[in-house]
């Protein structure tokens, strides 16, 4: 952030501490039997939704910097990792509480139900991204290779939105809204890269003017 | 510019406030006595006297709280909690039900007259949602068969079509830019399904008139079918010759069929139907196995003898 000199920047650990509040809140509700009529579904949904929210938050860092100059880059890793941790909690809830670790039922779900297939694929993409979200991995892979690998987050965001959209009947407003946010965040990047390309080839410009 | 003057004397200035407040209370009181007048507030639900039916399950009913706060009723929002939050806007006074189509005696009834001829029964039924959860619900109602008999169906009548109220001013899901289904919500049964003794029209739950979110003042209950067949807030019942389209089949015919019988062998593309979560069992509860025809196979399987239930799902 372009914080005026002398003002301390909030430490990264604060992002994690704040980021885990929803998880603690939802588990507390679960332990005290306050998750309503269908507690498993409510918990599963809440954790999945927070995974998606943190994923989207990590994807807003770059547009925010480019459009407003506010630089929160140092918090991006924390946001991405929070998305992964919530995805782990979401998946664990599904495997243990929803399916009771019934392997046959889980495999049948993955094979037969497109939204679960997509959800699993999304999670598998997030695993290597989470594993390489540390300074050691960045040095080891080299900046360019690391950046190339982490572009898969765009695919993960698309799959996460599809997973949500296909898991519900009809077209409720919530998953549609999140899908639109993903579309805007990725559309922005696509538009920017398309607009920047001609500038990279200055020779073409005079011809275009003529 | 014409400046219109308000009428010199308003009615409220002539009538003492005490008198008109009192009159409103009188009207509300009278309405509460007649069935189906469960007004906007749940508080005005009134007690129904009903015989216990031998067709009830002896399973423990799901708590009243969950039965009345965990609902799918898209006219009031898509979240399960939305109907209980939003359905208070629906006014069920002066409700009329039209029975028409291929019948000798097509009639439009005031709800009170529609219900009057029938003895109310308490039917405790299992309720299985297509989304993989279930409840046990103590409905109060009467057999649909009796309604159909009174209307005297013609020989050509093969199906029964049902229609929910369309009233965007009182149903938030029916207005605005973002509407999830085509209205009115419609459903249908084959005539023999509609005549089956298990099939009822419910006017109450838990010994009281239906809360709006449960489909007040009149809804269908077909316990061996997925919950979405139980159309709510019914305004029309028509006997017809051809199989009527139902809303969810129209919305997505690869996922929802006409019959929609509970069947653990036929998966919904998004939900395995082999097992179900019983509402109220808690966070750590195991899923329960789903039974063919929701456990009512002894009574209803014969209706579908010889039919390929994978094809006619």
Image (cartoon, coloured by chain):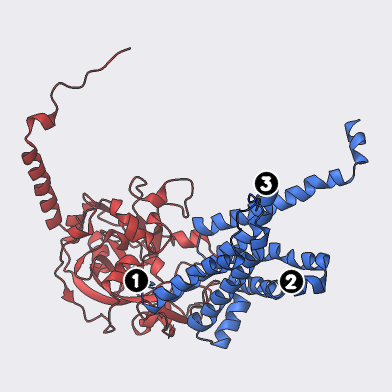
Chain colours: A blue, B red
Q: Categorize mark 2 by other alpha carbons within 10 Å: few (<14), some (14-19), many (20+).
A: few
Residue B301 percent location from the top left of the image? 39, 81
CA gap, disc 2 to disc 3?
A: 27 Å
Nearer the observer, A124 or B173: A124
Residue B274, above or below A75: below
Apparent side of residue B2 relative to residue A128 in the rendered image (left or right): left
The chain carrying label 3 is A
Please determine if labels 3 and 1 lie on a single subunit: no
Q: Position of residue B306 (x, y in %)?
A: 47, 80
The residue indicated by pointer 1 is B222
Q: Is residue A8 visible?
A: yes
Residue at (41, 56) in percent of width and height: B77
Which chain letter matches label 2? A
10 Å crowding of disc 1: few (<14), some (14-19), many (20+): many
Task: Tell me the residue that label 2 is attached to.
Answer: A135
Establish if B303 lies above or below B102: below
- Which residue ends up furthest to the front in the rendered image? A6
């Amino acid at each position: 952030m372009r914080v005026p000199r002398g003002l301390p920047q909030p430490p990264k650990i604060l992002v994690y501490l704040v980021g885990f509040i929803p998880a603690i809140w939802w588990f507390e509700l679960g332990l005290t039997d306050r998750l309503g009529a269908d507690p498993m579904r409510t918990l599963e949904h809440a954790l999945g939704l927070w995974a998606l929210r943190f994923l989207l938050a990590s994807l807003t860092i770059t547009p925010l910097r480019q459009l407003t100059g506010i630089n929160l880059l140092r918090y991006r890793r924390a946001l991405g990792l929070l998305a992964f941790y919530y995805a782990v909690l979401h998946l664990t809830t599904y495997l243990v509480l929803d399916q009771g670790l019934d392997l046959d039922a889980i495999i049948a779900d993955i094979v037969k139900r497109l939204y679960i297939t997509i959800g699993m694929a999304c999670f598998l993409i997030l695993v290597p991204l989470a594993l390489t979200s540390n300074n050691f991995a960045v040095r080891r892979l080299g900046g360019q290779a690391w950046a190339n690998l982490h572009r898969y987050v765009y695919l993960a965001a698309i799959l996460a939105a599809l997973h949500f959209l296909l898991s519900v009947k009809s077209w409720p407003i919530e998953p549609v809204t999140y899908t639109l946010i993903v579309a805007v965040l990725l559309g922005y990047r696509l538009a920017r890269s398309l607009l920047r390309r001609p500038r990279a080839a200055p020779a073409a410009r005079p011809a275009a003017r003529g | 510019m014409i400046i219109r003057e308000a009428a010199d004397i308003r009615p409220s200035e002539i009538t003492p406030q005490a008198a008109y407040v009192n009159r409103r209370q009188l009207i509300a009181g009278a309405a509460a006595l007649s069935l189906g007048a469960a007004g906007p507030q749940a508080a005005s639900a009134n007690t129904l006297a009903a015989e216990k039916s031998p067709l009830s399950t002896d399973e423990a009913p799901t708590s009243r709280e969950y039965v009345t706060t965990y609902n799918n009723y898209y006219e009031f929002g898509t979240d399960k909690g939305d109907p209980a939050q939003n359905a208070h806007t629906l006014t069920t006074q002066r409700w009329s039900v039209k029975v028409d189509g291929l019948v000798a005696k097509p009639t439009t009834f005031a709800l009170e007259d529609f219900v009057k001829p029938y003895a109310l029964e308490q039917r405790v039924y299992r309720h299985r949602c297509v989304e993989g959860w279930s409840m046990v619900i103590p409905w109060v109602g009467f057999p649909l068969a009796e309604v159909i008999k009174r209307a005297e169906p013609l020989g050509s009548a093969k199906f029964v079509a049902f229609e929910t109220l369309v009233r965007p001013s009182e149903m938030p899901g029916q207005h605005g830019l973002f509407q999830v289904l085509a209205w009115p919500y419609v459903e249908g049964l084959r005539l023999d399904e509609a005549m089956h003794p298990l099939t009822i029209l419910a006017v109450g739950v838990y010994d009281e008139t239906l809360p709006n979110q449960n489909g007040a003042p009149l809804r269908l209950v077909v316990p061996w079918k997925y919950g979405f067949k139980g159309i709510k807030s019914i305004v029309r019942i028509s006997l017809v010759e051809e199989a009527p389209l139902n809303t969810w089949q129209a919305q997505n015919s690869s996922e929802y069929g006409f019959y929609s019988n509970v069947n653990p062998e036929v998966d919904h593309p998004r939900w395995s139907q082999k097992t179900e979560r019983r509402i109220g069992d808690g966070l750590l509860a195991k899923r329960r196995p789903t039974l063919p025809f929701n456990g009512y196979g002894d009574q209803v399987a014969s209706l579908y003898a010889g039919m390929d239930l994978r094809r006619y799902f």
